[in-house]
Image: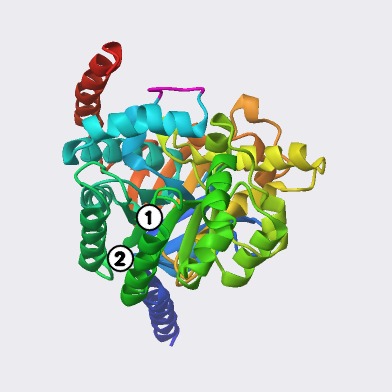
């Protein structure tokens, strides 16, 4: 009788263990952290938590101990002294301009563009230039924890293929302009190429969304901007453009059309489309209300705007009106890096000084501009910007705990005011690990460095000759 009882007890234990093992759900990756910031509005940081990933999606966010008990994952990344949060979103950049980093500084916007950037672009920008410069930009963004960016540069097909290979997520804009530009004689051929690019990529890649990218209202005529609106409506594509970037643009549009740049492009129908408006520095109260009612996403580029003395976007007023604002680095030629952590910190500090109000942009809001709110600004908040089941698995780990980072009282404060890009240890996009333990896995750094230096030597030679 006793033997039968022991056998039955053993059988029940075996059965219970088997049921428990079978109950563990399959997962591909578990990323742990002492803190997990989901960036879901109203949610506080979770302590000793984990994000569970299957394929390209987040399937759970829960305490680390429960994650290991419930899920059988192929890979588990530990979280000691690490914070897990959504990857950062760079709402406006020109990736290939990394190759013009530090080429010329300390000039106003129009002198910088007309006297240096445009001439050097006409001379050097080729598909090879764009491929190398974009890969350099992607390396820098992966290293710094940026997982999504909005780009606007020539040869967008080259950029899209680099994005595909390196694993990042991007809105890739195809620029068109009324003047000769690299590869094009003027409006007709550049606009035709933009339409072809959008047709080729629209709905074809999970991580890449194409966009029309008319440069600005001062470089593209009203008639041509209206043609962009029609093309975007036909294809349900995004539009990304520079808008109200500084006093010179405002004066020119006012003189030519008798309107503010915002009024001008709104009347042409751009506000009826999914528009990402970069810079938005000089705005009237009417402009802000018009932007808010249309659902236009705006992009604040604090470093770049300060460097060329364009001014400061009225971000607190935009947010108060309900406008979605992203942060952007702009291109490395006018920044001179793609470090979005600098933009987060500067956004938090700059508007305190501008308004005299230390609560103008709190740390939590500054971080949201680079994640949740930024995702809404670029019209991609259905998939990115927060860590929640069903969202894309785009996330980063940031390491903390060095002596110069002690003590820690508030992890959000630390992320905005203490930590920086050098503290990012892990970058994951769509469930794929792009960087682990600060080692980038999708780009050959040695080969990239050689390509960059070869290209830079040609640019140096041209600069030394004054041509």
Question: What is the chief secondary structure element of the magenta stretch?
Answer: loop
Circle count: 2
Where's residue 217, x and y in %?
46, 53
Judging depth in this view, the residue of 254 and 167 nearest the camera is 254
Identified at 21% across, 53% down, the residue is: 157
Judging depth in this view, the residue of 200 and 147 nearest the camera is 200
Please identify the quarter of the rendering in which residue 142 is found.
top left
Identified at 30% across, 14% down, the residue is: 466
Residue linked to disc 2? 206
Where's residue 110, x and y in %?
47, 34
Question: For the N terminus, which image quadrant?
Answer: bottom left
First of labels 1, 2 by sequence position: 2
Residue linked to disc 1? 214
Q: Is residue 103 magenta?
A: yes
Judging depth in this view, the residue of 309 and 56 nearest the camera is 309
Stretch in magenta: 102-106
Where is 296 relative to 315, above or below?
below
Which mark is drawn over residue 435?
none
């Amino acid at each position: 009788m006793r033997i039968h009882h022991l056998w039955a007890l053993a059988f029940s234990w075996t059965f219970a263990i088997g049921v428990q093992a079978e109950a563990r759900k399959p997962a591909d990756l578990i990323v742990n952290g002492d803190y997990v910031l989901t960036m879901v509005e109203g949610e506080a940081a979770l302590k000793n938590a984990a994000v569970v990933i299957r394929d390209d999606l987040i399937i759970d966010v829960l305490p680390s101990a429960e994650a290991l008990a419930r899920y059988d994952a192929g890979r588990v990344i530990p979280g000691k002294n690490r914070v897990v949060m959504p990857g950062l979103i760079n709402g406006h950049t020109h990736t290939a301009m990394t190759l013009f980093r530090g080429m010329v500084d300390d000039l106003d916007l129009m002198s910088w563009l007309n006297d240096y950037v445009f001439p050097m672009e006409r001379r050097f920008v080729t598909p090879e230039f764009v491929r190398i410069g974009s890969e350099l930009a992607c390396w820098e963004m992966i290293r710094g924890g940026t997982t999504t960016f909005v780009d606007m540069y020539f040869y967008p097909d080259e950029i899209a293929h680099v994005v595909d290979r390196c694993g990042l997520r991007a809105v890739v804009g195809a620029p068109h302009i009324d003047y000769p530009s690299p590869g094009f004689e003027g409006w007709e051929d550049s606009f035709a190429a933009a339409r072809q690019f959008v047709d080729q990529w629209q709905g074809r890649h999970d991580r890449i969304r194409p966009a029309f990218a008319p440069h600005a209202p001062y470089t593209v005529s009203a008639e041509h901007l209206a043609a962009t609106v029609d093309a975007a409506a036909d294809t349900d594509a995004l539009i990304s453009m520079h808008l109200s970037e500084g006093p010179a643009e405002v004066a020119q549009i006012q003189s030519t059309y008798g309107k503010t740049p915002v009024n001008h492009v709104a009347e042409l129908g751009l506000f009826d489309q999914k528009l990402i408006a970069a810079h938005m520095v000089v705005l009237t109260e009417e402009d802000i209300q018009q932007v808010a009612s249309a659902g236009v996403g705006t992009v604040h580029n604090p470093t770049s705007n300060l460097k060329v003395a364009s001014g400061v976007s009225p971000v607190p007023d935009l947010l108060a009106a309900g406008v979605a604002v992203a942060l952007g680095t702009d291109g490395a030629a006018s920044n001179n890096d793609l470090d979005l952590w600098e933009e987060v910190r500067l956004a938090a500090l700059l508007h305190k000084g501008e308004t005299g109000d230390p609560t103008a942009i709190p740390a939590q809001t500054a971080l949201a501009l680079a994640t949740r709110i930024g995702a809404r600004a670029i019209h991609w908040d259905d998939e990115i910007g927060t860590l929640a089941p069903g969202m894309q698995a785009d996330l980063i780990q940031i390491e903390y705990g060095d002596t110069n980072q002690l003590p820690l009282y508030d992890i959000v404060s630390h992320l905005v005011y203490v930590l920086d890009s050098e503290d990012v240890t892990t970058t994951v996009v769509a469930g794929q690990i792009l960087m682990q333990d600060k080692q980038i896995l999708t780009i050959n750094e040695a080969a990239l460095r050689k390509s960059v230096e070869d290209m830079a030597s040609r640019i140096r030679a041209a600069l030394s000759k004054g041509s």
